[in-house]
Amino acid sequence: MGFREEVDSMGTVKVPEDAYYGAQTQRAIENFPISGLTFQPVFIKAIALIKKHAAHINQQCGLLPLDVSMAIVQAAQEVMDGTFDDQFAVDVFQTGSGTSTNMNVNEVIAGRANEIITGNIGGKSPVHPNDHVNLGQSSNDVIPSAIHISAFISIKNRLLPALQNLHESLKNKADEFKDIVKIGRTHLQDAVPVTLGQEFGGYARQVELAIERLQSIKPRLAELALGGTAVGTGMNTHPEFARRVIACIAQETGCPFVEAKNHFEAQAAQDAAVETSAVLKTVAVSLTKIANDIRWLASGPRCGIGEIVLPDLQPGSSIMPGKVNPVMPEVILQVAAQVVGNDAAITIGGQAGNFELNTMLPLIAYNLLQSIEILASAVNVFTEKCVDGIIANKEKCAATVDKSIALVTTLVPLIGYDKAAALAREAWETGTSVREIALKRNILAEEELNKLFEKVHEH
């Protein structure tokens, strides 16, 4: 592969001749070989979306020639379409403002725009990555804006639909299992009966609240820092630039993006991203509760709780034939743990707002988008390959209710707490059921006792 020489403020650097990016990106690739992690396509596309509409508005404001603007718009759209995904190789761990990635996008768009106009890839003429593609912008307002745009779109298009499908599936199971009485459990000990439907209804409500929490953060995510440029003052940008560019972004995406009410807050802090991550952590905790319950309820199949049966997906052991494990709940548990870890990193990143700029923007962006993406993907497969196929073991549910000592609680209004406790101890020590002892002591007639025990789950 051949190379071309490009000059930037730090001197001459060799760039692969087939690269659309230029010297600044090449230096970043060489200087930051840290993790091998690169930004998610949705983040790169959010930056390109900003560049596309910035070029359009700058032309309308008389700041860009029409041919340059049109070439930038076309090149930015091609980046958004994924045509140049291989051109974005800068590591996530880079300068804290994300300047390296902003310049990577600027240079790729300029390089492609130059090819459109002249037939030659790359370079800075007639389209310059800073003077034209980055006109009216700074990394300091572009990267925070891209974080909000990409997170908002990912939540709207990926995570919320996934959670809505899970909510519907759990609601359907709650209805399907509404008449199946089983023993309740508190402190991992037998408690009074519930229905399997009531348990699944609780899970459905958790997911419903997760959806509501995610919806509630949208107004803060919708505020974009664009227009503040370097420090929030808007230096070197047209006074109508931010409002008009953001209006175009909102129209194209169908999302209610608006200019930040205060540009100093929008660039110096990342509170909306921290809040979003906290909500994602809450969603992860809810999913952990649901997945844990489901795998415990399915434990066995013969020597565990075994009140539900999960779909068989794959052999569960490399040594024990016939063993099938709850792989989908385990996926959820691992993803939830990753989201909680990401939230810790984002929280620390949010504390790095020093004076007029947060300097952990790449860390925040990558972890926030990863949390959204892995939650969405995991929830989709959990719904489709686990929850939709859950079957109730009615016989096992009924058997545990009959054996439960906790049924003695229903007798407390008739005989008092202390006598009920003594009855429970007798049942435990003798291995006799509460029903049998209650009949033996003539607490109620058998028909009345049956009716009392049948009604207990309704309360």
Image (spheres, helix red, strand yellow):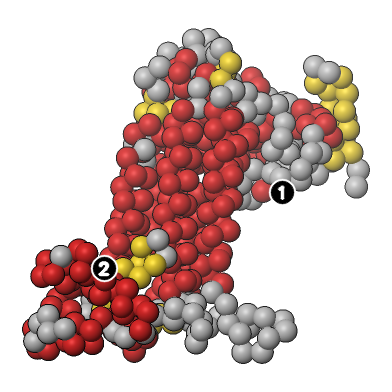
Report the amino acid beneath label 1.
Answer: Asp
Q: Is residue 404 left or right of residue 90?
A: left
Q: Secondary structure at mark 2?
A: helix
Q: Quadrant of residue 202?
A: bottom left
Q: Could you say which is closer to the camera, residue 389 or residue 370?
A: 389
* Residue at the disc numbered 2: 421
Q: Quadrant of residue 119?
A: top right
Task: Give the residue displayed 34% in from the left and 34% down from the top.
Answer: 219
Task: Give the residue displayed 31% in from the left and 68% down from the top.
Answer: 191
Is residue 126 depicted above or below 39 in this figure?
A: above
Mark sitting earlier along the chain (2/1) = 1
Q: Quadrant of residue 421?
A: bottom left
Task: Give the residue displayed 45% in from the left and 18% down from the top.
Answer: 265
Residue 411 location (% of width, % of height): 16, 72
Q: CA distance from mark 2 to mark 1?
A: 70 Å
Residue 373 location (% of width, % of height): 53, 52
Q: In what quadrant of the picture does the C terminus appear?
A: bottom left
Task: Using a 10 Å C-alpha cutoff, classify the residue at mark 1 as few (fewer than 14 neighbours), some (14 to 19) or many (20 or more).
Answer: few
* Residue at the disc numbered 1: 86
Residue 430 location (% of width, % of height): 35, 84
Is residue 177 depicted above or below 213 in this figure?
A: below
Q: Could you say which is closer to the camera, residue 404 or residue 123?
A: 404
Q: Is residue 340 left or right of residue 446?
A: right
Which mark's residue is nearer the viewer, 2 or 1? 2
Residue 135 numbered tag: none
